[in-house]
Image (tube, rainbow, N blue to C red):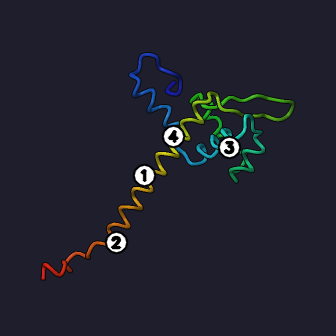
Amino acid sequence: MEDQPNFHAPLYEVKANLFKGLAHPVRIRILELLAESPTVSVTDLIAGTGQEASNISQHLAVLRRHHLVVAERRGLKVFYSLAYPQVAELLAVARSFLAEVLATTRNNLELSMTLPSAGQGTEADR
């Protein structure tokens, strides 16, 4: 089965498989909610994502298969938590990285707005 850890695969393949588990906005939102609180009920995950129960269930199954979350049944309710605290750290690093990329992109765009348009040239060129 492809979702099971392959101890003979190169590390980059194992990493790629981990990122496949992260590769959906709803799954990222679920992990962010779990990073904010030690345990979260499925009901609260549904409310926090605005998704249907069946959709959340499918995403939670993917996250479990990739060893990113763990489930605990308490009576009739199921609660989820991050399988490892490093998952929250990974999300924080991604957030920081994206903030830096967006800031750089914004700065480059602002700089490009100060440049003359193509074909206009500068006074010295005329």
N-term mark: 1 or 2: 1
Q: Which mark is residue 101?
A: 1
Badge 1 amino acid: Val
For the residue labelled by badge 2, is the local secondary structure a helix, a strand or a loop? helix
Q: Which mark is residue 93?
A: 4
Q: CA distance from mark 2 to mark 3?
A: 38 Å
Residue in the picture at 60% in, 31% down: 68
Q: CA distance from mark 4 to mark 3?
A: 16 Å
Residue beneath disc 2? 113
Q: Position of residue 126 (x, y in %)?
A: 12, 83
Instruction: Examine the image and state in which quarter residue 125 appears.
Output: bottom left
For the residue labelled by badge 1, is the local secondary structure a helix, a strand or a loop? helix
Badge 2 amino acid: Met
Residue in the picture at 51% in, 21% down: 5
Q: Is residue 72 left or right of residue 32?
A: right
Residue in the picture at 52% in, 24% down: 1
Instruction: Examine the image and state in which quarter residue 42 appears.
Output: top right
Which circle, 2 or 3, is nearer the viewer?
Answer: 2
N-term mark: 2 or 3: 3
Badge 4 amino acid: Val
Badge 2: how crowded within 10 Å, few (<14), some, or many (20+)?
Answer: few
Q: CA distance from mark 4 to mark 2?
A: 30 Å
N-term mark: 3 or 1: 3
